Image: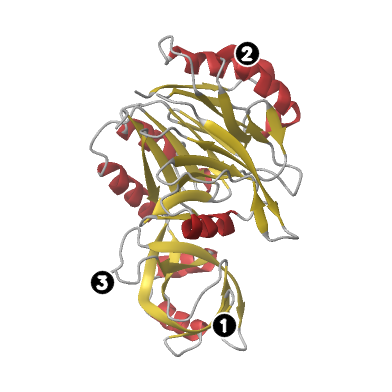
Amino acid sequence: MVTAGAGLSLNLDTRRAAVEAALAARAGLSGVSPSLAVLFASPHHAERAEALLDAVHEAAGPEVVIGCVAEAVVGSGREVEGDPAVSVWLASFPGPVDTFPLEYLPDQEAFAGWPGHGAGRAHLVICDPFTFPTDELLRELDREASGTVFIGGMASGGAGPGDTRLFLDHSVAGSGAVVARLPEGVDVRALVSQGCRPIGPSYTVTKAEGNVIVELAGKPPLEQLHEVLAGADQRDRALIARGLHIGRVIDEYAADPGRGDYLIRAVIGADPGKGAIAVGDVVSVGETVRFHVRDADAADDDLRHMLGTVEDRPSAALLFTCNGRGSRMFSVPDHDAALVWKELGEAPLAGFFCAGEVGPVGGRNFLHGFTASLALFYEQS
């Protein structure tokens, strides 16, 4: 059985905030001791990260802890942006939770700390965006540990290496990644909602060099984009001007790729002379891609659609939402958190704004952008 509780404090005093949030979360456990604490805090508490972690241990007594300092914090139906906040999520599981750190060794191009096994187990992961190549880890594990499930995100709010604060049990780290491997038999379901929508037709990549697309369907990408612009309305043209993205089809065997079938990557540069574009990922010849734009209406619709597929109320949930969403995307406050919390029957909810979200799509784990990734917890299967 999974029992959980969540608490949020807006107190600027670090210790008081930690105690208030932890005690509120502990109240939801009905006297059961917590196996795991997931802790998120705003940058206001970064300098006292160790004291924050100690206070959560004292107030709630969890066996293990993971979490991070983040740009913005989610607690129940709220998204706290710019103000001090501490969010604590506690859960009691029917077995032990294993926690461990991961480090990337650039001189060896290898990862250290992975304990092996893990197939069929759900893992919560929080990574440092400056020192840890999350997408490379996910690709490696998909090859070597098929069936391993990762849900989580990259810590946000830091300006550079060394700014990140990751919580792991009784310690605070400034690099790498922290992982919580959940017990076997715990039913965790992952949902990933996109924040972009496609425009124009699909294309096959006919020439590419690393992350540079040289040809789409035999033509320079910028030429294809000009044709899309010629047929676009004023609203789509404005969205393209604000930022263009490429959607890579996840399953090339899909007859008619649609909602949730694309892996979104930003267009990060262009060469007007050659008509080529650079994207935030390595692209291969033969892939199917489609231009995408960020769109608040489409993001709202997709999240509502995704939540509409949830038939049973979960015991609890964790939300990892992009730091490009929130007030940067929506005209109403607390959009993702309020909608998720309401649609899930006000189940205990916590989370943070990520610099990249981790979640499985089509049986494979990916690092996403502009998404809302959810981990839903159910009674033991």
Whole-percent x and y of residue 160? 74, 49
Residue 344, image quadrant = top left
Residue 70 can be seen, yes or no? no
> Distance between the Cα atoms at labels 3 and 2?
55 Å
Whole-percent x and y of residue 206? 46, 86
Report which residue position mark 1 lands on: 276
- Mark linked to residue 58: 2
> What residue is at 67 percent from the left and 17 percent from the top?
15
> How busy is the neighbourhood of tag 3: few (under 14 within 10 Å), some, or many (20 plus)?
few
Instruction: Specify the amino acid type for callout 2.
Output: Glu
Is 344 on the left or on the right of 274, as rendered? left
Whole-percent x and y of residue 53? 66, 23
Q: Quadrant of the N terminus?
A: top left
Label 1 sits on a secondary structure element that is strand
Tell me if label 3 and label 1 are in contact, CB under 8 Å. Answer: no
Given this view, does label 3 or label 1 mark the residue nearer the observer? 3
Tell me if label 3 and label 2 are in contact, CB under 8 Å. Answer: no
Q: Is residue 174 above or below residue 134?
A: above
Is 61 on the left or on the right of 2, as rendered? right
Residue situated in front as seen by the camera: 235 or 338: 338
> What residue is at 41 percent from the left and 65 percent from the top?
235
Instruction: Specify the amino acid type for callout 3.
Output: Ala
- Mark linked to residue 37: none
Instruction: Specify the amino acid type for callout 1.
Output: Ala
Q: Earlier in the sequence, mark 3 or mark 2?
A: 2
Q: Quadrant of the C terminus?
A: top left
> How busy is the neighbourhood of tag 2: few (under 14 within 10 Å), some, or many (20 plus)?
few
Report which residue position mark 3 lands on: 255
Tell me if label 2 and label 1 are in contact, CB under 8 Å. Answer: no
Whole-percent x and y of residue 335? 42, 40
Residue situated in front as seen by the camera: 363 or 165: 363
